[in-house]
Image: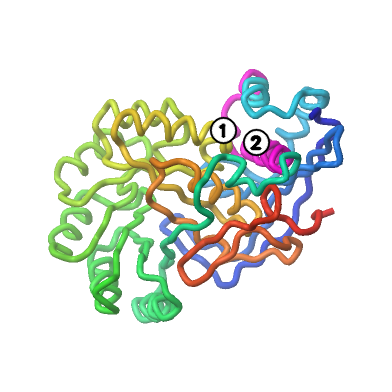
Amino acid sequence: MLIRDVETRLLPVRMKKDFRISYGTIDQMENVFIKLHTDTPFKGFGEASCIPFITGDTNESVIAAIDMLKADLIGQTVDPALIHDLMSRRLYANGTAKALVDMACYDALAKEADLPLHRYLGAQTDRLTTDVTIGIDSLDVSFETARAYYQEGFSIFKIKAENDADYSISLAKAIASLGDDVILRFDANQGWSADTLTRVLEGLEGYPVEYIEQPVDRKDFKGLKAARLISPIPIMADESVADLGDARNIIEGGMADLINLKLMKAGGIYPLLQIADYTQAKGITCGIGCMMESSLGLSAALAAALCHENIKEYDLDSALLVENTSVTGCSYYQGSSLIASEYPGLGLKEDLW
């Protein structure tokens, strides 16, 4: 299978409600979609969600990167290893653009094999249980959001937290009161001080907090290691780990108990699974998260999660927060279960264009 043409389009992704994290508020989105034409009847599609304050990528930079790569991609074999080698030689970083091409390649290959992507990658199951993220809002609103999700069947809650220990402790205790099956996760998105971390640890002793994600700045390696040393709760590195080199640095430096992976950081499925292989060899468990992908992009992350035994923590809830009416099929929710489509590839029932 050879690449014959590459197209990109910006398509709106509707936010079901404003979503606030420590960086700021996300109230509207346009995601970049790709269409990979091949010398077969099978086309590959993909979706990139750009969050500039996390990856540094913008819609404009992703489209520009794809335009720059286009001449080199045309005529190439649809082989993820070869395509990534080419992209790495031509373009430093730009993980979101690379993830977009990677996703389209896997979609086309799985369609050619007449398999849903998770089966193409060797997964033995088609579903997993995800957490749901509670964005920053007033305590009352955040609690009511969590309660509504709990009534829908969610019991694992990721709390987005600012540098406010009192808010974090109060909301966590309120959500924990919903039921004995509740599990809590915190995501500070690099925003906590050492004092906030210490106060949260003291205030939530005995509560079901599974881990604390990225409490300090991505480049504050000393602070990340210090957090791990003082915390009885596992520390997960997220923004500090984009690629395999970052994972090596964090693990060899003893800075985190867990690593969080995202397609948009890693550059796609192929390099993400390489990181998962490495962390498994080092005895470090991975989680997998998402940006603001609709069900198309989320289906790629789901397939990666299902096929690797070292990816065990799941934060794949973006399609609960956004929707794209152009996407038909793909992954879907039943309560807290995220289920892969049985349609070939990423599961699109109809081409986007």
Q: Are marks 1 and 2 in contact (CB under 8 Å)?
A: yes
Identify the residue shown where x is 67% and y is 39%: 106
Counting from the top left corner in percent of width and height, residue 215 is at 30, 49
Would you call the spot at circle 1 few (<14 residues within 10 Å), some (14-19), or many (20 or more)? Answer: some
For residue 24, the mark is none
**11 magenta-colored:** no
Q: CA distance from mark 1 to mark 2?
A: 7 Å
Q: Residue 351 is drawn in which quadrant?
A: bottom right
Q: Is residue 258 left or right of residue 87?
A: left
Counting from the top left corner in percent of width and height, residue 291 is at 54, 52
Counting from the top left corner in percent of width and height, residue 82 is at 66, 22
Magenta highlight range: 88-110
- Residue on which disc 2 sits: 102
Task: Give the residue type that dot 1 points to.
Answer: Tyr
- Residue on which disc 1 sits: 270
Identify the residue shown where x is 29% and y is 65%: 183
Task: Give the residue type that dot 2 points to.
Answer: Asp
Q: Along the line of sight, which residue is nearer the eye, 342 or 134?
A: 342
Relative height, residue 157 to residue 112 (above, below): below
Counting from the top left corner in percent of width and height, residue 152 is at 45, 78
Q: Is residue 35 left or right of residue 278?
A: right
